[in-house]
Image (spheres, rainbow, N blue to C red):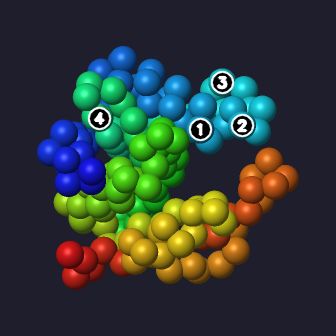
Amino acid sequence: MVNIMEDKLIIQKAASKEEFEALYDLRWRLLRKPWNQPKGSEKDEREDESYSFIAILDNKIIGTARLHKNNEKEGQIRYLAVEKEYQKMDIGKNLMKKIEMHAINLGLESVILNARKTAENFFKKLGYKVIRKGHTLFNEIEHYVMRKSLINAN
């Protein structure tokens, strides 16, 4: 099934107002709503200086993630979310690879992220290493700060 999906899956930067509305809705539904957070909490002050990516299958946005620069050498990935019915189908992995390639093209040498404890192994499989324990979101979601070097990355 994954091979069939690779033919149909499109990963690109969000461009239109409709794409941004859909990705913000996806972020909110998956990353904020389950913890009773209000609409708007899925955005932050870095949106206008960030690169938002979307995964599209059959003309439907099913995944998203965002990259912003922390400085000239380091980027940060945030808000990775994939619709529940498409999880464990390499959508997140493909989003991450596309974002990492974009980061390399921007001249970044590494990327960091704050991984939920439940996603730690997913990111480890992609080459990320835990740097330290991170924050606890909404008083219950433990995070780990993880980093990946993009120098000599394949």
Please report the residue visible at 46 percent of the width from the left and 59 percent of the height from the top: 76
Residue 134 screen position, x and y as percent: 69, 68
Residue 145 screen position, x and y as percent: 60, 70
Mark 3 burial class by Cα count in 10 Å: few <14, some 14-19, many 20+: some
**Which residue does the numbered mark 2 point to in the structure image?**
34
**Which residue does the numbered mark 3 point to in the structure image?**
39
Residue 120 screen position, x and y as percent: 57, 69
Please report the residue visible at 20 percent of the width from the left and 54 percent of the height from the top: 3
Q: Quadrant of residue 118?
A: bottom right
> Is 21 displayed left or right of 96 in the figure?
right
Of mark 3 and mark 1, the one earlier in the sequence is 1
Residues at marks 3 and 2, CA–CA distance in whole angstroms: 12 Å
User: Label 2 is placed on what type of residue?
Assistant: Pro
State the mark number for residue 132.
none
**Which residue does the numbered mark 4 point to in the structure image?**
56
State the mark number for residue 30.
1
Residues at marks 3 and 1, CA–CA distance in whole angstroms: 12 Å
Of mark 3 and mark 2, the one earlier in the sequence is 2
